[in-house]
Amino acid sequence: MDSSVQYINFVSLATGLTLGCILVAIGIAIGLRHARSSVREKPDDFDRQSVLDMLKELGTWTSEYSGNVTEYQTRIGELSVLAKKATSGTGKADPNIGLLLNEIMQSNSTLQKRLDAAEKQLDIQTRQIESYLTEARTDGLTKLSNRRAFDAKIEELFYAYRKGGKSFVLAMIDIDHFKKINDTYGHQAGDDVLQQLASIFRLSIDSPYLIGRYGGEEFVVLMPGPLRIAAEQIDAVRRRIAGEQFKSGTKVIPVTISAGLTEPRDEVALGTMFRRADESLYAAKNIGRNRVYFHDGRQSMLVGAPEIANGK
């Protein structure tokens, strides 16, 4: 191939890659500015996960283009040598080619530094947003998932089930006589009980999709089925809690829980499923507490014999 054609092709490649890097740098700047302003100005409406995904994608692009900068910087160096050998019709080197190459190399060197700085900033920003995501989806006291995270997860599982995916079980758990605990031992003791319960749930429930604090003294668990097996697992947790010594300072506090479970059926909305779980939970509390009931779509049923449910 004619040397003139070669270096013209190289120049085209270098120019194209340079423009690509510039566009990525602009995208990063816009993305970072949007992330910062969104977090600052409207945190409740801010879709943190989307921005996190965007930043990670930009980070990938930046790394890719940083590698490209190094590669075509080398090729442009080779082009510079080739340009010295290139001759015009008069047999003399074309000085415009050398000037153009030097300008491109200087621009690329500056761009490389800016991309390196952008990568560092992306890493910082991504870690910040990951922290925001964790805080937004975590209950501050128990460190379990909060109501917002639970709502998102159960919708995900429910609509996947509606499309032919796996079934799952919803367990709604309530601390028995929690107001009495607060009134008798103090609110700090109530907080201590909530934290200790959260720890037991983490250690005792196998492979849950989510364990969360629904609000106040209420907890929720999303777990694999079948329903009866899940109910027996929650009942085992109930028995463990009934035999546990909960402490707050020097105080020893008796704690029991009641639970209601169900799984999705033919309903088209989550509300029906929640009503079944609530119905089972109310049955457990109204019949004596310290019990686990599950709803199979027709009726609520006690797990275990009544004497076992009472912890005798």
Image (cartoon, grey):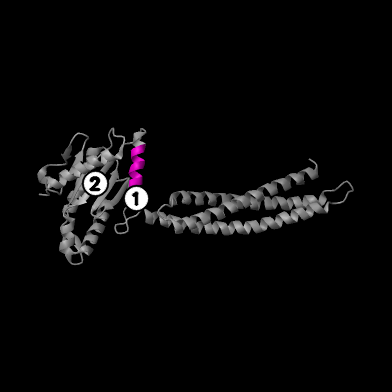
The residues tagged by marks 1 and 2 sit, at their Cα atoms, a distance apart of: 16 Å
Residue beneath disc 1:
148
Percent position of residue 226, x then y: 26, 37
Circle 1 packing at 10 Å, graded few (<14), some (14-19), many (20+), is some
Q: Which mark sits nearer the N-terminus, 1 or 2?
A: 1
Percent position of residue 75, x then y: 70, 50
Q: Residue furthest bottom?
A: 250
The residue nearer to you, when weighing 278 against 262, is: 278
Task: Tell me if residue 13 is in the magenta stretch.
Answer: no
Residue beneath disc 2:
172
Circle 2 packing at 10 Å, graded few (<14), some (14-19), many (20+), is many
Percent position of residue 168, x then y: 30, 39
Q: Is mark 1 on a helix, strand or loop?
A: helix
The residue nearer to you, when weighing 157 against 3, is: 157
Asked where in the image residue 157 lies, by quadrant, the reply is top left
Q: Which of marks 1 and 2 is in front?
A: 1
Could you tell me which residue is drawn at 49 percent across and 55 percent down? 35
Task: Tell me if residue 153 is in the magenta stretch.
Answer: yes
**Which segment is the magenta one?**
151-159
